[in-house]
Amino acid sequence: MEPVRTCVGCRQRSARSALLRVVAIDSHLVPDERATMPGRGAWVHDTYPCLDAALRRRAFVRALRVSGPLDAQTIEKRLNGYGNKVNGSK
């Protein structure tokens, strides 16, 4: 049986393999592809709606227990790259 985690964006429970672990390093959100980086992690679906909802609700700040704003450019770039590979667009 695979572990289940809750997406901080949509609050739906999903298998760990269906979610992306995110950690905060120096006020930057960093994707943890292998889910092995040290520290607290937050889990989110690999989609813009979930990422946007988590950012709007400040869910990453609460889940990661950090103060101040977090820079999400790294996560957004990862989603852009992933979408291009899947859709085959430029």
Image (cartoon, rainbow, N blue to C red):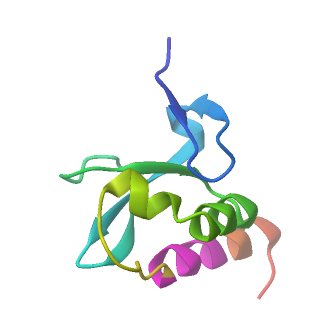
Q: Does 79 sit above or below residue 20?
A: below
For the C terminus, the quadrant is bottom right
x then y, percent, for residue 30: 37, 69
Q: Does 13 sit above or below residue 35?
A: above
The answer to whether any part of residue 32 appears in the image is: no
Q: Residue at coordinates 60% horizontally, 61% vertically from top-left?
A: 54
Quadrant in the rendering for residue 85: bottom right
The answer to whether any part of residue 3 appears in the image is: yes
- Left or right: residue 82 versus residue 29 is right
| Between 84 and 63, the one nearer to me in the picture | 63
Q: Residue at coordinates 50% horizontally, 84% vertically from top-left?
A: 73
Q: Is 78 in the magenta?
A: yes
- Left or right: residue 53 versus residue 15 is right
Majority SS type along the magenta span:
helix
Q: Is 13 in the magenta?
A: no
Quadrant in the rendering for residue 61: bottom left
x then y, percent, for residue 34: 35, 49
Q: Residue at coordinates 40% horizontally, 80% vertically from top-left?
A: 69
Q: Residue at coordinates 71% horizontally, 67% vertically from top-left?
A: 48
x then y, percent, for residue 17: 53, 37
| Between 82 and 55, the one nearer to me in the picture | 55
- Left or right: residue 38 versus residue 80 is left
x then y, percent, for residue 11: 64, 41
Residue found farthest to the left:
38
- Left or right: residue 81 versus residue 88 is left
* Residue extent of the magenta highlight: 73-81
Residue found farthest to the bottom:
90
| Between 88 and 46, the one nearer to me in the picture | 46
